[in-house]
Structure formats: C-alpha cells, structure tokens
Amino acid sequence: MAQIPNLDNSPLNLKSLREQSQRDLVKILKDIRGKKCLVIEPKLGGTLSLIIQTSLLKEYGIELRHLSAESVQTDCSKVVYLVPSQRDLMKSISSHVHDDISKGLQREYYIYFVPRREIQCERILEEEKVHHLITIGEYPLYVVPLDEDILSFELDLAYKQCQVDGDTGSLWHIAKAIHKLESTFGAIPNVRAKGKASVMVADILDRMHTEEPMNSSDMALSEINTLILIDREVDMITPMCSQLTYEGLIDEFLRINNGSVELDSSIMGVQQEGKKMKVPLNSSDKLLKEIRDLNFEVVVQVLKQKATSMKQDYAEISTANQSVSELKDFVKKLNSLPEMTRHINLAQHLSTFTSKPSFLAKLDMEHTIIEASSYDICLEYIEEMIHKQEPLINVLRLLILFSVTNSGLPKKNFDYLRKALFTLWKRELLHSYGFEHMATLNNLEKVGWLKKQESKSNWLTVKRALQLIVEDTDTANPNDIAYVFSGYAPLSIRLVHNAVLSGWRPMEEILKLLPGPHTETKRAGITSSPSFATLQGASNGLDKIADGRRSLVLVVFVGGVTFAEIAALRFLSAREGMAYDLIIGTTKIVNGHSLVETIFERFG
C-alpha cells in the first residue's frame, strides 16, 4: 500500500496543496539542467515521502542521497542539498565542498532551504568560505497533509524553542502556514486563540494580512469559517496520560513517524531474521479508518468479529452452491484480508504491552492523579518507580502529571524531606540516571512542569466545570469523548468544543484559571459562510455552505497534538447534530514520551 495518504475524502481540497508542493519541488529540480544528485536531510526525507513518490523523482534522472557527515559519493556534476534551516547542517555541507575541492572535483552546488533561508545559516557558509560557490534558494514547504483531516507544520522542536529557548521563530512559521492556507481557501473570518503562543500566532497572522494584503477574490466567501488556536501549554495533562485508542497506543509503544510505523517483520508474520518493515497507517487503509479511533479493548472485539464472519463465509462457500453475486461479495471480503492480517498482528503485539501488570498499574495511578483523590499514594508510587530505576521517561510523565494537576509538588513534603522534596527527588533522579540529566531537570522547571507548590491548584474547579471525569464510560458505544482515555475527557478538546459552539465568552472564568491569555476576533471585510450562526450556538436548523458541505473549523495545536485528541475531535465531528467538519493543524503529532524528550538536553 502506498505511503502517500489518500486525500479524496478531505473536507478541504488538501490534494491541491500536496500537488502544488510536488510542482514546486519538480520545478526546482527541472530548472537545474542536467544530471544531478539530490541530497536530503534524513528527517525531511520522511516528510517528503508524504508529498511525492521517490520513483517520480528518479524519472527526472535524479540520484537520491541522505545527508550525513560523509562526503557525497556520486558521478553527478551538480549536487543539490534540500535541508531545513538548521545551522549545524551548514558545517556538514561546507565540509563536503571542501572535501570535493581537495580531491580536485569540479561540481556545482545548490542549497534549497525548507521552508525558507535564514541569515544565520548563510553566515556560517560565509565563515566556512564556501558561500560564493553555492547557489541558494527556498522550497516553501510550510504545510504537509498527513491524512485527510490532519495538517502538519513539521515543527518538531516548536515547544522547546518557545518555552525553553525563548525562540519564537516557529510561531512566524505557523502563521505563515495558515496564511498560505488562506491564500488557497479564502481568508478566515473568525479567530479564537488560547495561550501565550497562540495569541502571538493570531497577532502575527493579523500583521501578515496588513503587510501582505490578499486579492479581493481571496477575501470572498471563505471555505474555513473559524480558526481555533490552542497552546499545548494550556493542557499538559492530556499528553502525559496513556492513550487508549488503537492509533494512540500504536504511537505510545511503537512510534508512528510520517504516517507509518517500523517493526520487526516477525511481528507482521513475515519470517525474515532481523528485517524491519514499514507499515503505513492512514485513511487509505479502510479497516484502519474504521478502527483507529476506537478504544483498544473494543478494537480487539471488532477484529475477532470480522475474523469469525470471514471464517463462516468461507465455510458456507466451501459447502454450498453459491450464486455469482454471493461469490463476488465473498471475493470482495477476501480483498480486505491483507488489512485484516495486518491489524490482527498489530493488535496482538500491542496486547503484549497492555496486558502487563505494570501498564495497568500505571493507568490506575494516572486516574488517581487526575481524580485528585489521594496524592500521598501517588507520591509513594512515583518514589518507588525512582528507587526501582524504571525508565526515566515513565517516571517523568507521572511526575509531570502530578505536578501540573497539583500546581506543583506539596510544601509539606518539601519541608519534611530535607527542606525540599523536589531537591531530594532531583538527587534521586540524578543518582539513578546520571548527572547528564541536570540540564533536563532545569528545563522541566523552566517550562513549569515541575515546581514547588506556591498556590492552591485550580484543577478541581476546572475538572468539575468542564466535566472532565466521566463515570461508567461505555467504550463500546461512547456518548462522550472521555472514551479515548476510559473515563477522562481531554481538557483541550472540551475547550475546543466550547469554542466552536459558543466562543470563549461563556467560559471566561474557567479560561482565566488556565495558562495564558485568550482572544477572540471577527475580522472586518471577510464574508463568512451562512452557517456561522450555528457556530455561535444557534439552536435552529443546521445550515450548510453554498455547495452543500458543512461549516469548516481549523483547529491548530501549537506545540503538538496526540492521536487520542485527534480521535476525540473526529468523534465530536461525527456526532449527530454537529454542524461542522474539522481540520486539525499541528506543529507535530506528540505523545508524552516524545514531548518530554524534546526538552531533554543531550550530551556527548
């Protein structure tokens, strides 16, 4: 199955975005005449696999290489580097050029920065005395469709850059990406933002409208009715919880990258010693589309039912005379057998993790922390994890979850345990895991994930007001988004739901208890679709825009979104009576592990 996702059923014409990105890249390469070697930064190569097939590039006589410290081995006289604007990469490229010169090789060099060139990078090339030998350009890839309802801005480090480094460059990138969407689908009339970074993105977007005015045609009826921007910082609770949807669990345990997961082939029933294989995970897989957002315990039952049904059909075909029509239906079912096999193997592998007592105990502890029922038990559990030297990330996720819901770590414990419990915990962590984590712990404090409790927590008030704990959640037939965590409704999605239905005003007091400011603006001179009234909570008939499609809301997560949150948004959009479709934009797709890892400081 192709790794490039099928976008035919997207509520927006995301296919046109992807095709434009393809054309932009092909034009860059065509304009460089003759045989050429395209050297791509490895992570960017994964992103490009969602945009264009490798075979298409090879049709243009292009050799492909991944950028590394090693010199480029090619007979091509033209070397084209396609790289993100990262200063460390300039040293490698400069080294390549110097190495070629020392060998007497005569080549033409090109660097295309993604999505834009940066002065700091060019300065390094000047310092290395190679800038004059290189032709420099840009490949403006700001938005990548991951699936029919997900757009990625491919900003893996956005959260750390903003919260730890104080670098807000990624916020300009997000605003530029949204502005590019507006140039294709019309200016967005309604903007709601929550969180410091999100409000900054909204402000930058407004400035772009002033500095880069749109054509009158772009100011016409917008296909996107409302933009909701929300900071990851506003809800750090959700990503620290273990996701319980099928796709969420795959990401938790196996890590989904660029719409696929890499596994030992033996897991997928292919007996090839030590061989890895990539399994694509997007809407092109019809069975995945059906089960990806279900709670995992339900997925197992669905797969069992489908397997049993197929077995019964086979028995009937083998023992009775069937009509041509019945045979045709059976063959159709057989066509889905590879998908069935794939997901049965995946589910079986996931079960080896989810059935472990340690995983179930961790789930119980997460719920205990969220319910704020007994923090003494929680503290003891976390301390025990440290003493057992359990994986650092697992310890930190629970510790952060506890700290965020309690507005820090309790004073009495600090005073009792050598004046500061947090200091003791730091020492235990450092003793168990090594001094290289000192900078990481400092970063955890800097972003406010771990701190000494200075004031009363607002968590109980927020939890009750937004009904974040739902008792007796029916995961098989859910009527609330809480099914994605078996009883906890993601705070971020409760906020988005309210913002879509009635804006920020009815929940002003709750918003004030959460990190960062909030804004709500209606842009002058931009026509909204007829169904904007429904987005403001009108109870009358659910209008549709002119061509019969539903109103469209773009929800952008600044700092990352989890698969469980995506599942919750899809659940809301699919509910009877909902007047809108949702497109999700994000700096990256995250889970608790990947989010914490972004602020790790690596040494050595």
Image (tube, grey):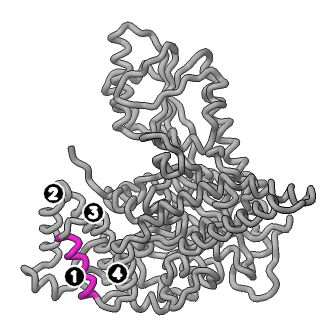
- Which residue is drawn at the image coordinates 55% and 19% (left, top)? 36
Asked which secondary structure carries label 1, the reply is helix
Mark 4 Cα shell of 10 Å, populated few (<14), some (14-19), many (≥20) = many
Q: Is residue 69 above or below residue 451?
A: above
Residue hosting label 4: 365
Tag 3 near tag 2, CB within 8 Å? no
- Image point (76%, 63%), residue name: 315
Task: Assign the N terminus to one quadrant of the image.
Answer: top right
**Is the magenta region chiefly helix, strand or loop?**
helix
Above/below status of 459 relative to 124? below
How far from the left and from the top, in percent, is residue 226? 66, 69
Location of residue 569 by image quarter: bottom right
**Bounds of the magenta segment:** 375-387
Q: Does residue 505 appear in this view?
A: yes
Numbered badge on residue 380: 1
C-alpha separation, residue under disc 1 versus residue under disc 2:
22 Å
Instruction: Find the distance from the CA under tag 3 to the CA under tag 4.
Output: 16 Å
Indicate which disc, 4 or 2, sits on the residue closer to the N terminus: 4
- Spatial CA distance of label 1 from label 3 is 17 Å
From the image, state whether disc 4 or disc 2 is nearer to you.
4
Q: Nearer the viewer, mark 1 or mark 2?
A: 1
User: Furthest residue to the front?
Assistant: 319
Q: Earlier in the sequence, mark 3 or mark 4?
A: 4
Disc sitting over residue 434 in the figure: 2
- The amino acid pointed to by label 3 is Pro
Front-most of residues 238 and 557: 238
Whether residue 516 is visible here, answered yes or no, is no
Quarter occupied by the C terminus: top left
Residue 529 percent coordinates (x, y): 78, 70
Q: Which residue is mark 3?
A: 391
The amino acid type of the residue labelled 1 equals: Glu
- Amino acid type at circle 4 is Met
